[in-house]
Image (spheres, helix red, strand yellow):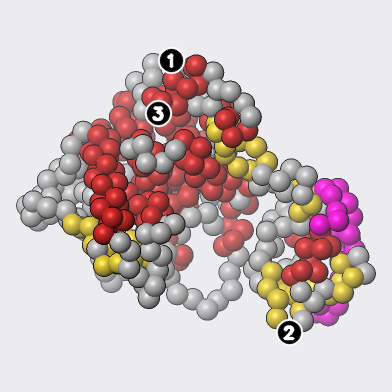
Amino acid sequence: VNHTGTADQVTQFTEHTKRVVNEMAAVFGELPQFDYGTYTFISCYRSNCAGDGMEHRNSTSLTSSGGFSGTSLGLLGTVSHEFFHAWNVERIRPASLEPFDFTEANMSGELWFAEGFTNYYGPLVIARAGINPVPTYARQLTNAVNTLTNHPGRRFAGAVGMSQQAPFVDAAVSIDPNNRSNTFISYYTYGEAIGLALDLTLRARSTPATLDDVMRLMWRRFGPQTAAMAPARGYTVADVQQAVAEVAKDSLFARDFFRRYVIGSELPDYPELLARAGFLVRQAQPTAAWMGDARLTAQDNAVLIATPTTIGSPMYEAGLAAGDRLLTMDGTNITSLVDVRAALGARKPGDRMRVTWMSRDGERSAELVLKADPRVEVVAFEDAGQTPSAAQLAFRNSW
């Protein structure tokens, strides 16, 4: 560890890492056989570092500009994610990535499982280790649940389709404008949301099973390595479905789940699924007036729309688009982000607002109908003033 913290902070971080390692080994039933007998966490936490985590077969490199003070849980989250890769991706690998060809774009439809399920287990394992309290873990689920609930990209593809776009979005460099904020959901996030739904669904069946059971079966079936340190057998989407079918002892259930949520893009019933564990899915700001999630930037006494407007948002429906410059909102000149917030702050969902803007083809004007902010959050019942039942607490503790 190269850091700016104290020795005590490193000691605590090391102890937390040990607990994560033990909980992760419990998921799969064993540690991998590391090629040289050891696994090394190489951490550099200094102000001149960019944040990143990169897994390897027998080590991981971890960097962050944040130190241990105030951000140690976030740093541990990266540790947890990358160590899960020692099984999932470094040894359990999609057939579409083997043998890897560094001269070509390697398209894979399985990244929702490879990265997404890893994203699901990262914070879950920290919670299981007793490091992260239940209310904090509940809120960590918000991003995945909210994204799948509200992102317009779900109408264009499911988890497999999003995975196949990796060559175009995963560190690809381009100066071309794009509309991916409307058409693409990260396979990290999509897969995390699917992992959550599948785990809770399996646990609630009349004959309960778990996603841990699925991961153990995938490990036994696809974890074995050749002498050349490569997977003896890569997996496909059909193989993951087969593993779910065997664990659930129900091939029709597995086929239907994959058809609807993995290959298809239906929305799992997160409020019902999470309520079983005493978690509540609710609107984050139900009374706030909302015109969209497009990013606005202010410069030279002007407010510009910096990203595409979200499909279905009031801005989108009024005709506003990336690159437009806001001029007035209900007759008030807009010269700063403060002006925008002031105009919205006095409004409520359903209100109508006349907006003028400068577009590529000149000045335009339209009536914008404000909506309720659709964003949702996940909270423990206790944080919402509700008392979970004994059955909900038992389900939660088992999970």
Quick one: 179 or 272, which is closer to the camera? 272
Q: Which residue is mark 1?
A: 206
Query: Magenta stretch?
Result: 345-369
Image quarter where the N terminus lies is: bottom left
Dot 1 and dot 2 residues touching (CB under 8 Å) = no
Q: Extreme right residue here? A: 331
Amino acid type for the residue under numbered disc 1: Ser
The earlier-in-sequence mark between 1 and 3 is: 1
Of mark 2 and mark 3, the one earlier in the sequence is 2
Looking at the image, residue 66 lies above or below residue 111: below
Q: Is residue 172 above or below residue 175?
A: above
Find residue 399 and name its label: 3
Residue hosting label 2: 300
Q: Which of the pair 69/225 is nearer the observer?
A: 69
Residue 186 appears anywhere in the view: yes
Q: Is residue 356 magenta?
A: yes
For the point 70% across and 81% down, the residue is: 299
Q: Which is more foreground, mark 1 or mark 2? A: 2
Cα distance in 3D space between marks 2 and 3: 52 Å
**Residue positioned 57% across, 62% down in the render:** 180
The CA distance from mark 1 to mark 2 is: 62 Å
Q: As shown in the figure, which amino acid type bears the numbered disc 2?
A: Asp
* Disc ID at residue 385: none
